[in-house]
Amino acid sequence: MSEFKLDFQDTATAFADKTNSELKEKYRLFKMLNSPLLNAIGTRTARFALAVGLPVEGLIKSTIFEQFCGGETIEECEPTIRKLGNANIGTILDYSVEGKATEADFDHTKEEIIRTIDRAKNDPSIPFAVFKVTGIAPLGTLERMSAKRKLDGKSQAKCERIHSRVNDICEYAFKLGQPVFIDAEELWIQDAIDRLATEMMEKYNLEQPIVYNSIQLYRKDRLQYLRESRRQANAGGYILAVKLVRGAYMEKERERAAQENYESPIHDDKAATDEDFDTAIEYCLKHLDEVAFVAGTHNEKSVHLLAARMHELGITNEHPYINFSQLYGMGDNLSYVLARHGYNVSKYVPYGPIADAIPYLIRRANENSSAAGQVSRELELIQKELKRRKIG
Ligand SMILES: Cc1cc2nc3c(=O)[nH]c(=O)nc-3n(C[C@H](O)[C@H](O)[C@H](O)COP(=O)(O)OP(=O)(O)OC[C@H]3O[C@@H](n4cnc5c(N)ncnc54)[C@H](O)[C@@H]3O)c2cc1C
């Protein structure tokens, strides 16, 4: 049997729907992100300028926002949905408003998430919806719930409202048969999120995977958690649905552990995270009859490993329980090549008011600037394509 290989260096496919000028623009932005100094200056200046009301929204919108977000509203995302759809890549509309604090804000965000589920209805180019519990819940209450601290009357009422917002979203998704991801966040609130997600799976995943919890494999305890979740689902007679990710809050987690003097929950090195991520993939493949999963990653090795294992095990590329997913603006070499080979692949397309999307953009900028990070990979690929088109 010939060796299985997907060519993720195929930049003609990866950038097929980018015009020359779009490609050059992407190159300029990633070049800037690749400089830790420019990156740091850029993110700090943006934060400051927005905080004091300087008119920088236009500049942000035409640069970093356009690369990583679909627009400010669902309507503004329509061209992106179509473009990705034409390449057989699904869109996951991700309403990226973070840092809100009032009950009215949380209700508003819940309504917007429900609109994304509505938009997804009957549209194969939007396979999943997604939300963050912190978008619809106060941090303090989630923290108290996670610490299993006794709640006073006021906190209890807030807790009930969180529960009903999460349930409203998942119930709506269930009624429409439209799967929804619940993102994973920081350790000190994740226990509350896990319990909510598990309850929703128990309720809505009896026939098909509707609610997906997210598992961050940079945490030392998550492989074990994945195994326990599978056993619990099996005993409860529902389908476990999980989105596997490495984890986006490493620095913050380590800082907090150091400050509060507890052992860091994060693996000591990248190799250990990588190993757990790939073991989690193997575990889900082994239990494919009862686990639906999404590999949320830009790591070429992990993506290739999953595709190769599917091939070895004789699992069809379009198996409904196996999905690949990347973030908009990143990992196009993976998404477009996977889609061309018939795998289920989708991209998070964040959207929302520019000022509210800043924390998301800063996470992407920081992630992209790390030495061994995504950006050098992205830059290399863009350069290769510019050369291939004889314009770079
Ligand atoms: C579709 C999708 C959904 C996502 N959803 C979530 C979510 O719900 N919650 C969330 O937290 N993140 C989420 N992420 C982000 C994700 O967790 C990663 O931050 C990001 O994708 C980079 O990891 P990678 O696997 O793509 O690539 P890689 O570049 O191979 O890995 C980078 C990651 O490895 C880990 N790492 C790096 N250095 C070290 C080290 N020294 N020690 C230990 N670990 C290290 C970190 O997690 C880092 O982000 C999502 C990503 C995608 C693509």
Image (cartoon, helix red, strand yellow):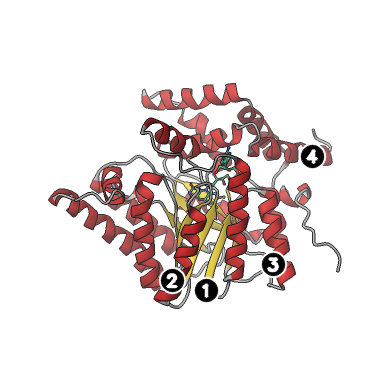
Q: Residue at x 74, y 41 (%)?
A: 381
Q: Residue 290 shows which numbered tag?
A: 1
Label 3, label 2: how far apart the Cα atoms are: 23 Å
| Furthest residue in direction left, as rendered | 153
Which image quarter: residue 88? bottom right
Which image quarter: residue 271? top right
Q: Residue at x 55, y 48 (%)?
A: 246
Q: Nearer the viewer, mark 4 or mark 1?
A: 1
Tag 4, which secondary structure?
A: helix
Earlier residue among tags 1 and 3: 1
Q: Nearer the viewer, residue 378 or 322?
A: 322
Q: Residue at x 38, y 71 (%)?
A: 202
Q: Residue 310 shows which numbered tag?
A: 3
Earlier residue among tags 1 and 2: 2
Label 4, label 3: how far apart the Cα atoms are: 29 Å
Q: Report the amino acid beneath label 1.
A: Glu
Specify whether tag 2 is near ligand 1 (CB below 8 Å).
no
Residue to which mark 4 is pinned: 384
* Mark 1 neighbour density, 10 Å: few (under 14) some (14–19) many (20 or more): many
Tell me whether circle 1 and circle 2 mark residues in contact (CB < 8 Å): yes
Q: Nearer the viewer, mark 2 or mark 4?
A: 2
Residue to which mark 2 is pinned: 233
Marker count (numbered): 4
Earlier residue among tags 4 and 1: 1
Label 1, label 3: how far apart the Cα atoms are: 16 Å
Tag 3, which secondary structure?
A: helix
Q: Report the amino acid beneath label 3.
A: Met
Label 1, label 2: how far apart the Cα atoms are: 8 Å
